[in-house]
Image (cartoon, rainbow, N blue to C red):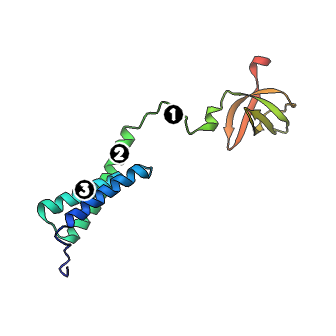
Amino acid sequence: MIDGSLPIAAHWLWLILALALGIAEMVVPGVFLIWLAVAAAVTGLAALAIGIAAPLQFGLFALTGIAAVYAGRRWFAANPIRSEDPLLNERTIRLLGERVVVTAAIAGGQGRVRLGDSEWTAEGPDAPIGTRMVIAGVRGNALHVVPDADLI
């Protein structure tokens, strides 16, 4: 081991690392570890096929890791995952057009409205309690409301 080489079965260490990273990718969200698993598998197969020295194995892993991550990011940018519900994690944007009722008078542009079973901070034109409004926008966690056109 003084000559900088890994044990004879070093290729197995890379292949086990590739398997572990592949399993970790399934457990940890993010689509990142799979590319490092590919790099570890390439390194393990290269070490098995041509028996390269340890420093070259680490260099190969670094280069293939960078290349795999870069290629993966480009592929996902060119082929985005389409969702049946693209606003799934955009709760506030899903609220646009919803009707609300003023629960704390909107005065000076600030008040509160009821939406479903919760109350939200609201911004908009002055309105007394009980006025029906429509959500026209969201700023931070405050709803921008306007008078309900169907009632005017």
Residue 22 at x, y = what percent? 33, 52
Secondary structure of the residue carrying tag 1 is loop
| Dot 2 alpha-carbon crowd within 10 angstroms: few under 14, some 14 to 19, many 20 or more | few
Q: Which corner quadrant of the image does residue 46 belong to? A: bottom left
- Report how far apart the C-alphas of labels 3 and 1 lie in the structure: 34 Å
| Residue drawn 22% across the image and 71% down it | 55
Labels 1 & 2 near each other (Cβ < 8 A): no
- Report how far apart the C-alphas of labels 1 and 2 lie in the structure: 21 Å
Give the label on residue 74, or none.
Answer: 2
| Label whose residue precedes the other's in the sequence (1 or 2) | 2
* Residue type at the position of mark 1: Pro
Q: Is residue 4 left or right of residue 85?
A: left
| Dot 1 alpha-carbon crowd within 10 angstroms: few under 14, some 14 to 19, many 20 or more | few
Front-lying residue, 97 or 12: 12
Secondary structure of the residue carrying tag 2 is helix
Q: Which residue is mark 1?
A: 86
Residue 20 at x, y = what percent? 33, 57
| Residue drawn 37% across the image and 37% down it | 79
Judged by depth in the image, the label closer to the viewer, 1 or 2, is 1
Judged by depth in the image, the label closer to the viewer, 3 or 1, is 3
| Label whose residue precedes the other's in the sequence (3 or 1) | 3
Q: Is residue 87 visible?
A: yes
| Label whose residue precedes the other's in the sequence (3 or 2) | 3
Labels 3 & 1 near each other (Cβ < 8 A): no
* Residue type at the position of mark 3: Ala
Q: How many marks?
A: 3
Residue 59 sits above or below residue 131 on the image = below
Residue 37 at x, y = what percent? 31, 55
Give the label on residue 41, or none.
Answer: 3
Image quarter (top left, top right, bottom left or bottom right) of the C terminus: top right
